[in-house]
Amino acid sequence: MEHLPVEVIGNILSRLGGARDVVIASATCRKWREAWRKHLHTLSFNSNDCNVYQDLTTSRLQILITQTIFQTTGLQGLSILMDDVDEFSASTVIAWLMYTRETLHRLIYNVRTNPNVNILEICGRQKMEMLELSHNSITGVEPNFQRFPCLKSLSLSYVSISALDLNLLLTACPKIETLELINPEIAMSDAQVTVELSSPTLKRVYVEAISLDKFILEADSIECLHLKDCALELFELIGKGTLKHFKIDDVSVIHLDIGDTVDNLEIIDVSNFTIMWPKFYQMISKSSKLTKLRLWDVVFDDEDEIVDLETIAVCFPHLIHLALSYDLRDGVVNYGLQGSSHLENVFVLELGWTIINDLFSHWVEGLLKLCPNLRKLVIHGVVSEAKSHEECQMLANFTSSIVQLMRKYMHVDVQFDYE
């Protein structure tokens, strides 16, 4: 160990992450203390890591963090997550950021201060590549002054910001590729809550727990879009056909428009969502390059609506992975097995139920016949804790029928995933 270069020791300490572990390890010898001071590039303070932080008073904790940070030089990654800690002094936090900002590439910041600390003003015009802010407030964004020329990833969680400032912030990041918005508090000047965002460089967008009247996203380079747990009247995506991965989970939206961005879609993942199948199908029907389609716990706006698997087979000839959950309405399955076309390229098939009955195994058998080149079958199910004798018997019958069925498909790997 004594022959290790001090730079290598600095890398080892940086991979420990937690500041407490780093400080303890740096006490090994003089060489390790030198590595901590001069070659440590990543440091993390997390109030959930150990009980030590929770046992300290706020003032003592601020002193401890200050002493630790000020003994380092050249920090590139700094994470300060103080979830269950009282408000810090703004002047102390500003001192941390001013000391490290010229070398910082990554900042993860969740600190409540009084008054609020303007992170953009302190860290703008520097080398920052990744910024994650939580429980903070952003006001009065000035793109020309608070500019992030190197920022590629921005995450805002429980952050208060106006719709205008949010768009201006994207403008201040000319190289941004990844944007995460988690439960933001959008301040609006009028009664209608509308957010319009525009960025020519954005590739990945994740939006969670947001409630708006209108959300318009203009992103010419977007490849991945994920909406989760949102309530929207209108969502519109304006792009140039670069979208490859579209995922929507537990979203309420009256008007969904992803326009002409679907030509290169490879993955569509829809779950816990109410759809009008004809309209939704019309929107995605041009996605001839689709390789994965997942429709899970979807509710059809028209109760009599049936998704024709024949249509799926014809329109998505490159489909490799198909995932469908079973829904039985008045003895009719939402996914019809009619037609002569086969899903020739489907290698992975995932099927699931919420309420099992005798028809499920017949549905599974019908889908197996449609996938002649299938290699893997995953069956998902929900098993309640308290079950009647009839329910237990039905589950037993289903298991027996699947075992008997799979004897005909010995080449298929079968997995069960129950919750």
Image (cartoon, rainbow, N blue to C red):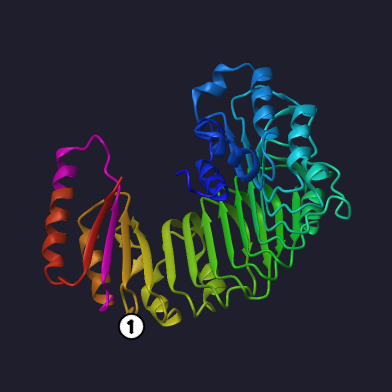
Q: Is residue 188 above or below residue 330?
A: above
- Residue 381 falls inside the magenta stretch: yes
Rendered residue at 48%/60% (across/down) = 270
Residue stretch in magenta: 371-394
Task: Inspect the image, locate mark 1, and give the three-letter code of the amino acid beneath it.
Answer: Ser
Q: Can residue 157 be seen in this view?
A: no
Residue 51 is situated, as x and y percent measured from the top left of the image, at 50, 22
Residue sitting nearer the eye, 242 or 21: 21
Residue sitting nearer the eye, 256 or 126: 126
Disc 1 element: loop
Rendered residue at 57%/72% (across/down) = 283
Q: In this view, does 329 lie above or below 116?
A: below
Rendered residue at 27%/70% (across/down) = 367
Left/right of residue 245 with respect to residue 375 in the rendered view = right
Rendered residue at 33%/83% (across/down) = 341
Q: Is residue 224 above or below residue 211?
A: below
Residue 178 is situated, as x and y percent measured from the top left of the image, at 64, 58
Residue sitting nearer the eye, 399 or 48: 48
**Residue at numbered disc 1:** 341
Work out which quarter of the rendered image holds the N terminus and state it. Answer: top left
- Residue 18 falls inside the magenta stretch: no
Q: Is residue 406 visible?
A: yes
**Mark 1 surroundings: few (<14), some (14-19) or many (≥20) residues within 10 A:** some
Residue 258 is situated, as x and y percent measured from the top left of the image, at 63, 67
